[in-house]
Amino acid sequence: MTANDIDTWRSLPAAQQPEWPDSEALRDVLADLASYPPLVFAGECDQLRGRLASVARGEAFLLQGGDCAETFIGNTADAIRNKLKTLLQMAVVLTYAASVPVVKVGRMAGQYSKPRSQPVETRDGVTLPTYRGDAVNDLAFTPEARIPDPERLKRMYHSSSATLNLVRAFTTGGYADLRQVHAWNQDFVALSPSGERYERLASEIDGALRFMHACGVDPEEFRTVEFFASHEALILDYESALTRVDSRTGDLYDVSGHMVWIGERTRQLDGAHVEFASRIRNPIGVKLGPTTSPEDALALIDKVDPNREPGRLTFIIRMGAGKVRDALPALVEKVTASGAQVAWVCDPMHGNTFEASSGHKTRRFDDVLDEVKGFFEVHRALGTHPGGIHVELTGDDVTECVGGGDEIFVDDLHQRYETACDPRLNRSQSLDLAFLVAEMYRGH
């Protein structure tokens, strides 16, 4: 393939793209981005595809999580470390309970743009372009702030580069040591209102670690951790500019992240996003909502995974707690019968959003948990593998979702409502979820 092969999407309708006011400025930015070094390497993408093949075969579990929308101002060492710490803590619990490797993928280092339901926003009689993420415009509600600015795409690249640099340092430099992560979990169990429920599992992990230590087992895998980055491939100009021909194989890779996904709003079969994804060798995710038909899913497989390659395609299910048990079985049955080996992953966040009386967008922890339960129940009934969870979370003590062990009420939402877009689970709620999913996995 050549770099020109990536531009086939340009002749197709592309949903959710910014309306850049200055096409010449955009061209200059894209030319600069095309000259920048890759953020990730093709070999790393291949490695993740191999790990996701294990998920598709039922031999591993995917934990994918991070911000709803990253922001430039929130891209600090503390915020990155806290997110990573939360994901590592969740992974230890899930690894032990599932007795299979947990593939760890951050929703970070590129998640700077968001699809929106409306192109404009009106407040007090003033109508402005909607906020589409820091990659495009600013959250402030002023005419100047809301003008799409292509220079922000370069800032996204540099912010993503800084995040990946720090994550690589943390995951290989001792911070991710399994014993340390387990000690953090013990602290959580000791302080959590739900701690008594989780104590048994934490004690079992503690006993296993002490046994290995007594045997003199100290593998390198205890001290470092494999961690990958992913984001929604939404702004196709940016993703195209960061697509390169791999010198080893001649294949095209989007080197903005190890895995990219297509959202529920951009998965049109005749659309630009699906066409773009079909051209690159990265592992691809596709979000599937409650209106997805089995025929839609099979057509997506034909387009994006024509060779039926395990690890190539992940279906990320986002149906809502009230719909997953009814809408998911037919999809899983028909896809499985077709012979395709996709990884099935549950996104229990996006189908469970509602507006609280305070005006805040929020989610109930119980709904999030119930969608995961429904997802597991469907797979248990069909004898298929519940391959993972995809969660919007932060490592900070925000108050954006209601419920959880440290119960947050609707009246608490205003205290630390910091998200740029959708409500995220805080650190405590994320760890609650990990322990509860671990219990489900053991019952699977």
Image (tube, helix red, strand yellow):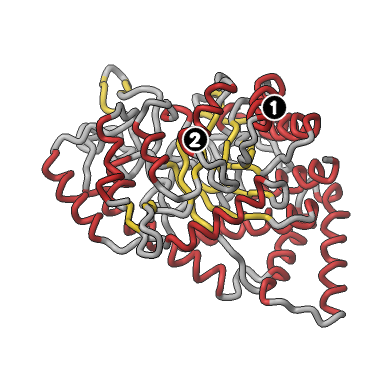
Secondary structure under the numbered disc 2 in the rendered image:
loop
Return the x and y of residue 262 as percentages of the image width and height.
Answer: 45, 36
Q: First in sequence, mark 1 or 2: give its number.
A: 1
The label number, if any, that marks residue 193 in the structure image: none
Whether residue 110 is situated above or below residue 182 in the rendered picture: above
Task: Give me the residue at 78% from left, 47% from top.
Answer: 438
Amino acid type assigned to the residue bearing label 1 in the image: Glu
Whether residue 238 is situated above or below residue 358 in the rendered picture: below
| Label 1 CA crowd tier, 10 Å (few <14, some 14–19, many 20+) | some
> Mark 2 = which residue?
422
Q: Quadrant of the C terminus?
A: top right
Question: To which quarter of the image does residue 87 belong?
Answer: bottom right
> Mark 1 = which residue?
333
Task: Give me the residue at 49% from left, 43% from top.
Answer: 284
Q: Nearer the viewer, residue 287 or 201?
A: 287
1 or 2: mark nearer the eye: 1
Task: Give me the residue at 62% from left, 50% from top.
Answer: 53
Give the left or right position of residue 24, taking residue 89 as reference. left
Amino acid type assigned to the residue bearing label 2 in the image: Asp
Return the x and y of residue 58 as percentages of the image width and height.
Answer: 72, 47
Residue at the bottom extreme of this rendering? 216
| Inter-mark Cα distance, 1 to 2 | 32 Å
